[in-house]
Image (cartoon, coloured by chain):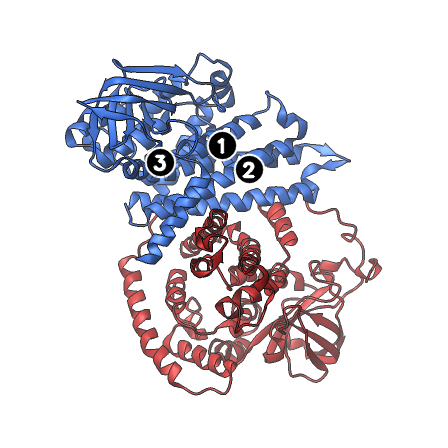
Chain colours: A red, B blue
């Protein structure tokens, strides 16, 4: 076990740091009409420097580097306030799926622009009747010549409103059990018949969308994997999701520590309150546990091993901690905590925002409950849920609200 | 960066597991549990000594194997999993570490080879009563080369040959013999013994020059990492037992492991145990590298491991239902050991407080 950089790693870190110092300064000096344009410019700059998709092959626009190098660059980049959130889902989940299942012409056309941030991708799996039960998809695709005609609705599609392309899982055969009648496609989100409606979330923002399909034509050439073989492709995508989502961002132990040092407690600063200190220690232990667990995952990757199931615990822990830290800071204000105006609240409203965002994070990308089922079944080998839908044709399954 | 045991360390760990499966099954643990007159498993202690484990982290020049602390962590993980009823922690994690940290060459030459050979049992005597050990709680004093005071409880104090004693001004070495009286105490985990030690003008020798509480904490930081691996091994074993029972036990026509109430409980155990493992690994690195991060890493490892073992040991009993509450079930061996290990180097609440104190110091720097 060694936490220090090897000589090669130290060299790489020094180069990355020097590159960041120069390029961040140049980047910040630019003028951008909006946040997304600025984020795209930064992504393009990283791609040109070999720092975008560091572990991907150079022939596809990646950096041709190692998982450890990717971690090192991420650590150094985190010292700067740059925004890569627009590309997380596309580069973390969608484009890897395209790379694994599409033909060379498709890869040549799309991978490079995605790496450079020119084009943004979305993942369209969830539906109103298929949230935790993703395979219960009803959006229907019917073959018509060289095309498939798609009708139905997707929901909780992150970033669809600013995305160019997506991968979509649809039902191509309702006469077989649900997992056996699904097919995956890539598609142009600007295609006729697609309507994107942002969802107004309880947090006030609109990160997610409903995506409606009305007679949308998708060429069969855009199919990823076999007809009715889409579930296996979806599992490939979701396997990458576990690694992509992980930490969740937002406020952490360091933020509430800094806050508590100057916040009023009952008798002096909140940081001197014994009960608060006990809680803070537990949050620190959790955060360090996740950070170090991630290092174990990276170690496995760098040895060419498949990461162990330990990578699946990240979101459960991070999302619940975010909710607890946010709310603890809100309650620390006593009556003042009722106020949500960012101009009047600590850390420009970050704790209040975390309190209102955390319920979504506990659900997105697999609820706490589904993730615990996954750990229990796939890691510990406990029996799967009792299933009434296993051997029945999808069209015969009972439906509720 | 590399965040895993090396292949050699994995081999050592596998061998340790095989050895303990053969030499330390639960019948052996229960033999100590059920006999109030037996402080520890003397045959196992001898066998462990013959394996060289006592000197795994002791340099070769002092009679050890000179492997390092990561190797000792691997052994500790297996000892914890087996609930080994021997004075390993007292002798190796506390006393040998205290000697390596603070001992003069003469002290190291005198004691470390005998510890490595299994000829000496050690004990670390700090507490003088209920509540955390602080500068104000220590009444033990030294004058004219002799030590006087009372320590309670001292784990393995009834069988120790060499006792490292915390007095007001620092740590002292005291040998069993004149001026040292031991009274055996009833303990929550009878597979680990403890005593009240009364020192009356006992001959002593200063160990190091650090102030008392600072020296104690420096030893605790090192022991905490090693104890975290024992706790981790125990928590792993509890999760395995709970999983095994959840698959074997049927209720309402199916395996109880198929019910979400049980699945989610075991998933929670898994999450806590993995966080504890990751934090223990970081602590192992800090200990082995003698890194400046050790105090914070040790506190983090100890809080995580204490929490994981407590949770896994209590929910293992719950998963076993009424059977888990019987004396014949092994569940309580781990429940008892989780209490012993969580308290022997200071309680989790004190370590949480220390952790936050370390964060404050770091941020002030």
Label 2 close to label 1 by CB (< 8 Å): yes
Residue B187 picture location, percent across and down: 47, 22
Decide: is A18 above or below B291: below
Front residue of A282/B122: it is: A282
> Dot 2, how many residues are within 10 Å of its Cα: few (below 14), some (14-19), or many (20+)?
many
Say whether disc 2 or disc 3 marks the residue closer to the N-terminus.
3
> Alpha carbon of mark 3 to alpha carbon of mark 1: how far?
24 Å
| Res. B338 mark | 1
Identify the residue under disc 2: B312
> What residue sits 41% from the left and 61% below the top?
A67
Residue B116 visible from this viewpoint: no
Decide: is B210 above or below A117: above
Front residue of B253/B199: it is: B199
Look at the numbered disc 1 and give the secondary structure of its residue: helix
Residue A322 picture location, percent across and down: 54, 59
Question: Which chain letter matches label 2?
Answer: B
Front residue of B222/B182: it is: B182
Side (left or right) of B256 relative to A326: right
Question: Which chain letter matches label 1?
Answer: B
| Res. B134 mark | 3
> What residue sits 62% from the left and 27% below the top?
B324
Residue B146 picture location, percent across and down: 21, 21
């Amino acid at each position: 076990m060694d936490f220090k950089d090897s000589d090669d790693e130290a060299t790489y870190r020094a180069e990355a740091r020097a590159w960041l110092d120069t390029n961040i300064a140049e980047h910040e000096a630019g003028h951008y009409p909006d946040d997304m344009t600025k984020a795209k410019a930064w992504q393009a700059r990283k791609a040109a420097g070999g720092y975008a998709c560091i572990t991907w092959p150079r022939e596809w626009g990646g950096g041709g580097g190692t998982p450890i190098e990717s971690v090192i660059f991420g650590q150094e980049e985190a010292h700067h306030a740059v925004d890569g959130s627009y590309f997380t889902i596309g580069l973390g989940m969608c484009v890897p799926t395209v790379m694994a299942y599409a033909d060379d012409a498709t890869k040549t056309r799309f991978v490079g622009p995605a790496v450079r941030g020119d084009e943004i991708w979305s993942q369209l799996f969830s539906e109103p009747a298929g949230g935790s039960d993703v395979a219960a998809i009803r959006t229907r695709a019917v073959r018509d010549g060289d095309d498939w005609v798609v009708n139905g609705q997707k929901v909780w599609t992150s970033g669809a409103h600013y995305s160019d392309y997506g991968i979509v899982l649809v039902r191509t055969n309702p006469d077989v059990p649900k997992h056996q009648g699904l097919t995956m496609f890539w598609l142009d989100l600007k295609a006729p018949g697609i309507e994107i409606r942002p969802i107004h979330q309880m947090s006030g923002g609109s990160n997610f969308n409903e995506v409606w399909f009305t007679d949308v034509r998708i060429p069969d050439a855009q199919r990823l994997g076999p007809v009715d073989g889409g579930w296996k492709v979806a599992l490939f995508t979701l396997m990458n999701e576990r690694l992509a989502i992980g930490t969740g961002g937002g406020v952490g132990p360091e933020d509430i520590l800094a806050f508590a040092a100057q916040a009023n407690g009952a008798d002096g600063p909140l940081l001197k309150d014994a009960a608060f200190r006990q809680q803070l220690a537990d949050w620190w232990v959790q955060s360090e546990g996740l950070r170090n667990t991630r290092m174990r995952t990276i170690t496995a990757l760098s040895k060419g091993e498949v990461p162990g199931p330990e990578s699946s615990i990240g979101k459960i822990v991070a999302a619940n901690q975010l909710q607890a830290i946010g709310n603890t800071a809100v309650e620390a204000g006593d009556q003042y905590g009722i106020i949500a105006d960012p101009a009047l609240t600590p850390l420009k409203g970050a704790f209040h925002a975390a309190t209102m965002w955390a319920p979504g994070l506990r659900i997105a990308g697999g609820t706490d409950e589904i993730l615990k089922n996954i750990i229990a079944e796939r890691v510990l080998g406990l029996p799967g849920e009792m299933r009434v839908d296993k051997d029945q044709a999808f069209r015969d399954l009972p439906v509720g609200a | 960066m590399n965040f895993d045991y090396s292949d050699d360390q994995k081999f050592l760990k596998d061998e340790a597991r095989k050895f303990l499966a053969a030499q330390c099954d639960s019948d052996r643990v229960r033999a100590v549990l059920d006999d109030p007159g037996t402080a520890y498993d003397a045959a196992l202690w001898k066998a462990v000594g013959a394996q060289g484990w006592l000197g795994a982290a002791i340099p070769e020049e002092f009679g050890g194997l000179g492997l390092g602390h990561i190797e000792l962590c691997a052994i500790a993980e297996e000892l914890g999993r087996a609930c080994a009823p021997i004075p390993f922690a007292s002798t190796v994690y506390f006393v040998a570490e205290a000697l390596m940290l603070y001992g003069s060459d003469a002290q190291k030459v005198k004691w470390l080879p005998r510890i490595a050979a299994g000829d000496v049992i050690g004990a670390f005597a700090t507490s003088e009563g209920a509540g955390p050990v602080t500068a104000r709680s220590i009444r033990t004093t030294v004058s004219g080369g002799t030590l006087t005071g009372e320590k309670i409880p001292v784990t393995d104090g009834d069988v120790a040959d060499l006792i490292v004693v915390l007095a007001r001004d620092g740590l002292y070495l005291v040998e069993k013999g004149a001026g040292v009286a031991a009274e055996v105490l009833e303990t929550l985990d009878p597979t680990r013994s403890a005593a009240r030690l009364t020192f009356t003008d006992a001959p002593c020798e200063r160990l190091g020059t650090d102030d008392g509480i600072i020296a104690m904490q420096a030893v605790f930081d090192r022991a905490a990492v090693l104890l975290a691996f024992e706790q981790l091994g125990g928590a792993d074993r509890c999760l395995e037992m709970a999983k095994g029972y959840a698959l074997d036990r049927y209720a309402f026509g199916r395996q109880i492991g198929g019910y979400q109430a049980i699945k989610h409980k075991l998933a929670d155990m898994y999450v806590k145990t993995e966080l504890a493992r990751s934090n223990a690994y970081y602590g192992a690195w800090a200990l082995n590298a003698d890194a400046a991060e050790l105090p914070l890493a040790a506190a983090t490892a100890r809080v995580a491991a204490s929490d994981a073992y407590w949770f896994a040991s209590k929910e293992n009993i719950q998963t076993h239902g009424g059977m888990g509450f019987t004396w014949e079930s092994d569940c309580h061996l781990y429940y008892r050991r989780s209490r012993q290990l969580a308290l022997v180097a200071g309680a989790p609440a004190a370590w949480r407080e220390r952790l936050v104190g370390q964060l404050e110091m770091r941020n002030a720097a």
